[in-house]
Image (cartoon, rainbow, N blue to C red):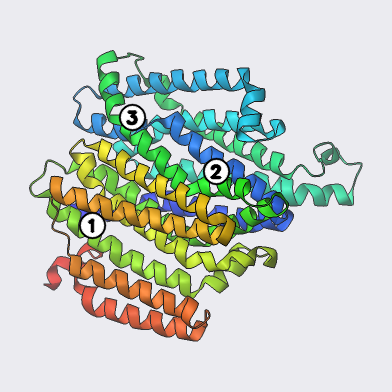
Amino acid sequence: MNPLKKLFKQTFVYGLATVLPRMLSFILVPLYTSVMAPGLFGKLSVIFAWFAIFNVVLAYGMETAFFRFYSKSKEKNKVVSTSLISILVTTGAFICIGFVFFESLSELLEVDKKYLGYVLLILALDALVVVPFAWLRANEKPMRYAVVKILNVGINLGLSIFFLVMLPSFVEGNSDGILSSLYKPNFQISYIFIANVTASGVTLLLMSELYRKTNWFFDKALWKKMMQYAMPVMVAGMAFSINEVFDRILLEKLLPEDVSEAKVGMYSACYKIALFMTLFATAFRMGIEPFFFNHSNSENPQKAYAQITNYFVVLGSIILLGVVVYADILKIIIVRDPAYWEAMPIVPIIVLASFFLGIYHNLSVWYKVTDRTKFGAYISIIGAILTIIINVVFIKYFEYMASAIATLVAYGSMMFLSFYFGRKHYPIPYNFRKIGFYLLLSISFSGIAFYGFDRNLIVGNILLAIFLGLLYKLENDNLRKVFLKNGNKDN
């Protein structure tokens, strides 16, 4: 099979594994916002922000290191067992430290003690499946990966609907029933965490086969090499998490106390409308990461890498313009409560920021295949510094708009820095005229549709039709080569 066709086939399956669960999780956003006021949803969003940061700490770059060493090692079992033992030990240590210093940790993170136990347990369960999921991807088992991921969100979704919607209705109709013993008023956040714990526990159970089959041999020398590779990845991941979620924490801390949680709730809810770009970029990254490593030693891999980035920009430009044009329709579906809609002006900015992040991940191939992961750390740290500075300086003036702009500046800077350093260390023949044309046209049309004509749907549809027409005329043959079996016969 053509390597690019194989890539897009795997990306499609990984996309299902990523998109379908998140599409299901779309239901959680209107669900949460329908049973929680913006202030309570803001509190939940801040806790989820801490989740994102600690997930990176507990994985400490082991997923990427596993890919790198598993793909080139002849003794793959050693890589598996060493990775599993490392994750087990660090996760166990985290749980012990977390519960020993429970009170101090609650005060430090400003997370209520009644939620912190759930948080620690979910973090540990999620850390223990990092290597098993990486093993599935490294062995090109996307269907198994997809099924487990979808089941995880299905359980989470089902329990959330039961606890937040069905259980209150049952109890209201029959306060003396058996289910009344499960119901507690004002318990929404705890119910959400109980659903998460259950879903994560079932996921670990389904992924435990790798633990049962491993030979439990720890190669200290191999582990040191993996950690040398992984540490810059972890630093980059931490910086990325700061770029992605730390704005919620800063908004809560820097805005007046009487409005901070409500503003965080509005910002977080409208931020979800940009999820379509995030889903696309994540699915694409899940497919290309193994491809990058597996084809790094092939003949002229740079040509394939350039083509991949071109296709990403083409498809991403469509999603950018489409989401912006239909933002007012999407808000009714995703964020149903008008109390949250005040933050809608952030949507184009966040969608574009997510697009820049996706391009950055494509450009980052050069430091991953050349083992220069420290550059990824440097670039992400610069992005994180920009995020913190812009938020700290401007939140008091522009509230969540400052956070949105900070996200855009951070990801845009990371994209340009990765290209700059990559051109020096691992030149790739990107088609800059094509990439620049689609990117600028999509951004321009998005700005005109959303800000210039006040989100007028007729104008937006006209601009989208013009863009798609140009795209069809210029890219039809190239896309057919990749997506159609008989594409090569067309030339």
Residue 380 appears in view = yes
Q: CA distance from mark 2 to mark 3?
A: 21 Å
> Residue 14 appears at what percent x and percent y?
37, 49
Give the residue at mark 2.
49
The residue at 73%/54% (across/down) is 35
> Residue 339 appears at what percent x and percent y?
69, 64
> Residue 147 appears at what percent x and percent y?
46, 44
Give the residue at mark 3.
231
* Mark drawn on residue 95: none
Give the residue at mark 1.
308
**Within-10-Å neighbours for mark 2: few <14, some 14–19, many 20+:** some
Q: The C terminus is located in which quarter?
A: bottom left
Left or right? Give the position of 118 relative to 307. Answer: right
* Mark before the other along the chain sequence, 1 or 3: 3
Left or right? Give the position of 348 relative to 304. Answer: right
Q: CA distance from mark 1 to mark 3?
A: 27 Å
Q: Give the SS element for disc 3.
A: helix
